[in-house]
Image (tube, grey):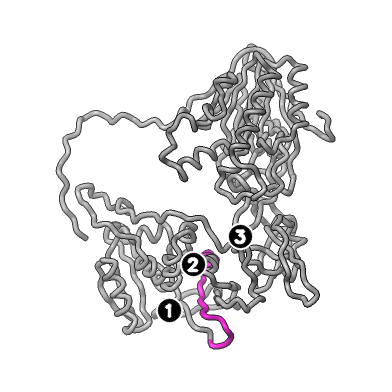
Amino acid sequence: MIATKKQSLVLAPDLPEAIVTRDSSHFNIDGDGWWLYLSDVHIPFQDNLTIKLAVKAAKAQFVKGVILNGDIFDFEQVSRHPKPPINERYIKERFCGLQFLTYLRQQFPKIRIIFKEGNHEERLVKYLSQKAPELFDLDVLQLPNLMKFDQFGIEFVGDRRLVRLGKLSILHGHEFQPQLMSPVNPARAAFVWGKTKILCCAAKTPILCIWGINIITLKGRGRLSLRITPDHPIWSRTDERCPDGKTKEFYSPKWVEAESMVGKYWMSPCNFPESNIPSVDHTRGGLTDKNLIYEPINVSKELLGLVGRWLGDGWVSVPKHQLDSSTVTICCGCYSEVDELVAMVDRIGLKYTIRESKAGLPMVVICKSALAFWLIQHFGKHARGKTIPSWALGMPEEFREELLRGFLSADGIKPEYGSYEWECFTISKKLAIGLKLLAQSIGYRVIMYAADPPSGKGTVLGKEITLRQTWKIKGIKSFKRWSLGVRRDGYLLAKVEELREEQPEEVFNISVEEDESYIADGMVVHNCGHFHQTSEHHEPTIIGHPQAAWSVGCACDLNPYWKPFNKWNHGFALVRLYKDSTFEVRNLRILDGKVV
């Protein structure tokens, strides 16, 4: 490490001026009269009948204003997710949005219209910050200007500000914090979170904890298996076969419930979006001497190879009271491996020492605290806690190859039997899944399965340890191994061949921003519900005062490409605000084309 003294600075004895990045004040609405509440229209995927029924009901009550509570525009084309090629471009989405605002203003020419930003509108901000940061501050690309809010006389509420209609709080679903919530009544979920009177749109529940749910185990080609609930959607494809039994073509992918997956192909991703590699941060882990300038660590292919080696046979030592003395240790099987490892460390430019373990095996100890804390932050610690971070799957291919090569040099072997090119073991399931996806991203066909469960104690480097479940991963690049799956459109497809029922147990259903899909054990799956449901919950306070929460239905017919399981209903709300700030809520749903 090279350190030099910085020049001293002369600072004023006053507090620095605070940087304010958002408006956190409440947006208050007062006065006497009825208001129309509408949310989750998701233009251009709107349900026109719901909108017309809501407008008709609002006119009958002579509403004073309209509250558009987020996700009015879908903004699919600027989301981070793949888009169906048949969809219109973003300019068409904007045109449809302007047409909706024109219709709404013509229906209500003289009343207030308040637009609260939702998570789908935030897609535009995220897109600009990630894809076009140079254009981020252009006024013409800000949502109010892009959608001509001034021309329509629309008041914009951003920054996730809380809207207060008298004593009633109005929130959008993405403003809830992750926690355990009720899966049965979304309004109760909102109430549990807010402990106050809340009117919200889709009460998205980030984590649903459900007890006593039936479980099934799906098994596919390549020894892949997945424990899941029967109604859990899985991203899959079906094939059409020729008379000779060979696959002719695959149909377009779609969501299929787990209990119907036998005979279909589940899909494991091979291509991942490009990502930035986080730098090694010298300010973490107690490196608090601001007068020192530390020599930077370049995150190179060699460093990723060293990380792979550490994932296979290394650990981090962090002294409790001397954090800046933390070290990274990599164990070698014999002294002949030390020369290669030391040459790699020299090329990176790190300081090291060579020591010997109690079992007589050589160890390379790297003295770099910043590297130690970087490894813990991104790759975990302890053998059972190591993992492959998601950004590593989006690195350049040569970096991914070097990371896998480094791991295999420590923990990989050439199988004695069979045609696989390599196999490796780990007691970390997270690491096993990460290695599977990493290998798939560079062209391997991979199987991953749990080895026979161990029992009792074992010995490593002279130390007694408790044996844990081991996961085995095998890889091959040959395209002749059809049994391992086939590559199509950036996915590895493997046929599901068996379904086995299990005993009921506790399960979790998570919510993911924007499209509710995620990767489970290497497979693309969907959560079990997006709660655009009309519901309400009432509960008195400890002194008997009434409290309540309402979840309002949506006004959209969401794109079936992403939302095939319609566990929501259409609806809107009418809210009467009185002069004393009290209110009355009519939470209305639409059934068979009628308001009920």
Identify residue type, mark 3. Ala
In terms of sequence position, does the residue under pointer 2 or pointer 1 come before the other?
Answer: 2
Left-right relation of 82 to 242 = left
User: Which residue is more in the foreground, 253 or 196?
Assistant: 253
Is 431 covered by the magenta stretch? yes
* Cα separation between marks 2 and 3: 18 Å
Residue 161 is at least partly visible in this image: no
Identify residue type, mark 2. Arg
Q: Residue at x 31, y 29 (%)?
A: 17
Q: Which mark is residue 144?
A: none
Range drawn in magenta: 416-435
Identify residue type, mark 1. Val
Dot 3 falls on a residue whose secondary structure is strand
Within 10 Å of disc 1 (Cα), the crowding (few <14, some 14-19, many 20+) is: few
In terms of sequence position, does the residue under pointer 1 or pointer 3 come before the other?
Answer: 1
**Quarter where residue 66 is shown:** top right
User: Which mark is in front, 1 or 3?
Assistant: 3
Q: Please state the horizontal and vertical placement of residue 82, each as a whole percent of the image.
A: 59, 51
Is 208 covered by the magenta stretch? no
Residue wearing tag 3: 520
In terms of sequence position, does the residue under pointer 2 or pointer 3 come before the other?
Answer: 2
- Residue at the farthest bottom position: 416
Q: Is residue 461 above or below residue 171?
A: below
Residue wearing tag 1: 460
